[in-house]
Amino acid sequence: DADVTQTPRNRITKTGKRIMLECSQTKGHDRMYWYRQDPGLGLRLIYYSFDVKDINKGEISDGYSVSRQAQAKFSLSLESAIPNQTALYFCATSDRGRFTGELFFGEGSRLTVL
Amino acid sequence: GQNIDQPTEMTATEGAIVQINCTYQTSGFNGLFWYQQHAGEAPTFLSYNVLDGLEEKGRFSSFLSRSKGYSYLLLKELQMKDSASYLCAVIDSNYQLIWGAGTKLIIKP
């Protein structure tokens, strides 16, 4: 089983619908992240959380919200989906410490908003 | 602003050597990463450089020059399975990870 699990893996929805992407991890890491990836662009950080009581906006948080329900769970919500939120979404984790760049990614959730 | 530049696409031949370059302009520097990403899959960690010089790991090596804001990933004895995108990422002074758009490497027989 994967250490970082995302559900759903694929989702097609309509404009205006509420969507939740879920992420759970068994690595025991404190830090969790949500990224989106679009063709021709680098990974862009949406939100990140360094522990259960810590939530931080990334560079593109508008239109998104998150919830850290437990150390192992971090969900991303689109309250009212729009077509330009069509993208591949990745959840990632990292361990505490100075070496903060090594991320462990989930398999991705491909979202299409029609 | 912060910027990381990599070639969009490169083509190489099976068994050959290829060098993928990455240049960066960031607010501070606390390390540089290379990740590999096969199409439709998650990125996976390849290497980490924080000091100048070459880090070798099997067929893959990564080089860093902090004074030049430059790194490269060297892949030797290319195999078809090396066809993937290679992502360069830099940790800035705020310990934020800044990503390049990635280089798509195509390996031909």
Image (cartoon, coloured by chain):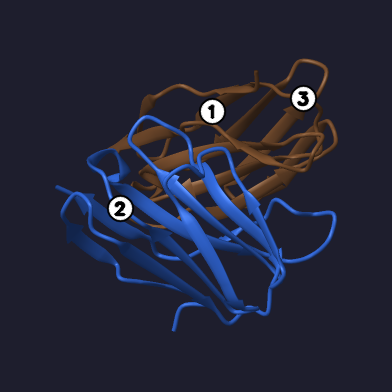
Chain colours: A blue, B brown
* Residue A96 picture quarter: bottom right
Residue ID for mark 2: A80
For label 1, the crowd category at 10 Å Cα-Cα, with few meaning under 14, some 14 to 19 and many 20 or more, is some
Res. B39 in view: yes
Residue ID for mark 1: B19
The amino acid sitting under disc 1 is Gln
| Residue drawn at point x = 60 percent, y = 51 percent | B46
Callout in the foreground (3, 1): 3
Q: CA distance from mark 1 to mark 2?
A: 43 Å
Q: Which mark is residue A8?
A: none
Res. B75 in view: no
The amino acid sitting under disc 2 is Ser
* Residue A107 picture quarter: bottom left
Front residue of this view, candidates B51 and A91: A91
Q: Does residue A102 appear left or right of residue A13 in this picture? A: right
The amino acid sitting under disc 3 is Ser
Is the C-beta separation of discs 3 and 1 under 8 Å?
no
Residue B53 lies, in percent from the top left, at 81, 32
For label 2, the crowd category at 10 Å Cα-Cα, with few meaning under 14, some 14 to 19 and many 20 or more, is few
Residue A48 lies, in percent from the top left, at 62, 56
Q: CA distance from mark 3 to mark 1?
A: 26 Å
| Residue drawn at point x = 21 percent, y = 51 percent | A112
Of the two numbered discs 3 and 1 on the same chain, state the one appearing first in sequence: 1
Q: Secondary structure at mark 1?
A: strand
Check the residue under mark 3 and report the chain it is in.
Answer: B
Front residue of this view, candidates B5 and B64: B5
Residue ID for mark 3: B27
Front residue of this view, candidates A34 and B4: A34
